[in-house]
Amino acid sequence: MTGSGNSGDADVQRNGGTSGSSALEFPCRFPVKAMGLNADDFSQHVLQLLDAHSEHIEHDQLQQQTSRSGRYLSVTLVVQAQSQAQLDSIYRILSADARVLVAL
């Protein structure tokens, strides 16, 4: 359903993003998870990717989980997200990286 009302504008202003469909209110703490092959430097690699696109990463909240087989590693970091556009950018960067197999 499309319309030309101002209700979407209110959502954009309240949520700080470019889309009125976000259920999040910004700024907010948001966990970002990246999964890749288990390598000694994978966590640091993910940190570097996120540091380049967000000033508000809670490094002390880093969580790692190795798969049962030990082949894969998931890294979860909490980002102090300022907008939906910022989260979208973070997911684009993670998804485009060859070492990141899945971004959640």
Image (cartoon, rainbow, N blue to C red):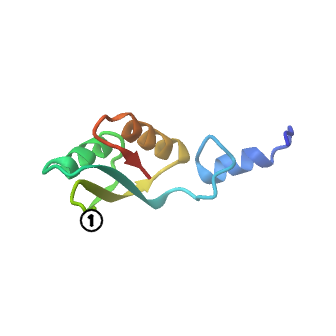
Which element is circle 1 on? loop
Q: Is residue 50 above or below residue 28?
A: above
Q: Residue at x 53, y 41 (%)?
A: 85
- In-front residue for pair 95/25: 95
Residue lying furthest front: 69
Foreground of the two, 59 or 10? 59
Along the line of sight, the residue nearer the viewer: 5 or 88: 88
Query: Which amino acid, by three-letter code, is at mark 1?
Result: Arg
Say whether residue 84 is left or right of residue 97. right
Q: Position of residue 93 (x, y in %)?
A: 39, 37
In the rendered image, residue 40, in percent from the top left (x then y), is placed at 13, 51
Can you say which quadrant of the picture contains the N terminus? top right
The number of callouts visible is: 1
Q: Quadrant of residue 99?
A: top left
**Few, some or many C-alpha atoms within 10 Å of disc 1 (few <14, some 14-19, many ≥20)?**
few
Outermost residue toward the left in this view: 40
Q: Residue at x 24, y 43 (%)?
A: 48
Looking at the image, residue 27 sits to the left or right of residue 42; the answer is right
Image location (x, y in percent) of residue 42: 20, 48
Q: Is residue 103 above or below residue 70?
A: above
Residue drawn where x is 30% and y is 57% of the image:
74
Residue 51 is drawn in which quadrant?
Answer: top left
| Residue denoted by label 1 | 68
